[in-house]
Amino acid sequence: LNQSTTLLISILIIACVLAVAVALYVIKHISNAFCRVRAGEAREKSIRENMLEALITINQQGIMESCNASAENIFGYNRDELIGQNVSMLMPTPHREHHDEYIQNYLTTGKAKIIGIGREVTGQRKDGSLFPLILGVTKLVIDEQPLFIGIINDISKRKAAEEALRISHEKLEERVEKRTRQLTKANRQLEILIQEKVATQARLTYLANYDELTALPNRTLFYERLHIRTVNCKRNKC
């Protein structure tokens, strides 16, 4: 081989080595990026699945595309029973029949009735039971397609506690009112007894000093007064 051929082969070998090194470098960085993406997705999934609130995503047709474990627990459905179904299945009548209209009206007019605003509404579980919840809805646009994210907080326990407190408060008010009536009645009876006692004492005093028929001072009072006058007269040597 001549010198030029040897030089060309050397250049090709170096180019191949560099190409392999660059390829390995690119593959390494792509792999690291992919791992970071996977780690981020795993982290987001872990956060989503451990939320106390139910999280449900729906498309513009109202079809559920994803949900978390809390959504299963709150509504009583398995995930496979929810994904691909209309979210209206989680609502009672009449909202169930009109939910798709709500979405279309929003997409047409842009006027939000619940999106961006947390509201207390009623949900329906798989067994048909109704329960109160707080619903918050936000909107995202992905690939020029709207995606709605619903955050649902079951407030059944809070409502039950509030109802128990209300009933307890009403019972307490009833007991207080009843006791007040009893005390008022007892106070009136005591006033009547006092009045009767005063009247009796006045009557006895009158009978002790006056004749009941003639209303004149009775003989006992006359003798008492005569005795007092006599004593005073002797004392003063009248």
Image (cartoon, helix red, strand yellow):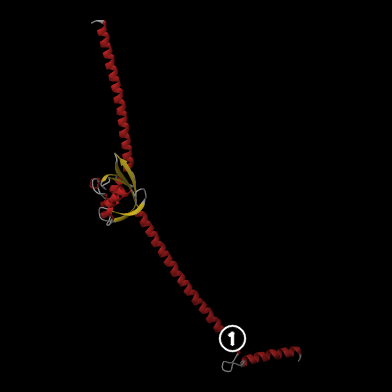
Q: Amino acid at mark 1?
A: Thr
Say above or below: 228 vs 11. below
Spot occupied by residue 80 in the image (x, y as percentages of width and height) = 23, 45
Determine which quarter of the picture holds residue 83: top left
Q: Is residue 7 left or right of residue 238?
A: left
Check the image and name the residue furthest to the top: 2
Spot occupied by residue 107 in the image (x, y as percentages of width and height) = 30, 47
- Residue at (64% x, 92% y) in the render: 222
Instruction: Tell me, yes or no, if residue 41 can be seen here.
Output: yes
- Residue at (30% x, 28% y) in the render: 30
Q: Identify the residue under disc 1.
A: 205
Say above or below: 211 vs 42. below
Front-most of 200 and 14?
A: 14
Determine which quarter of the picture holds residue 41: top left
Image quarter (top left, top right, bottom left or bottom right) of the C terminus: bottom right
Say above or below: 190 vs 133. below
Spot occupied by residue 61 in the image (x, y as percentages of width and height) = 26, 47
Spot occupied by residue 167 in the image (x, y as percentages of width and height) = 38, 62
Front-most of 182 and 43?
A: 43
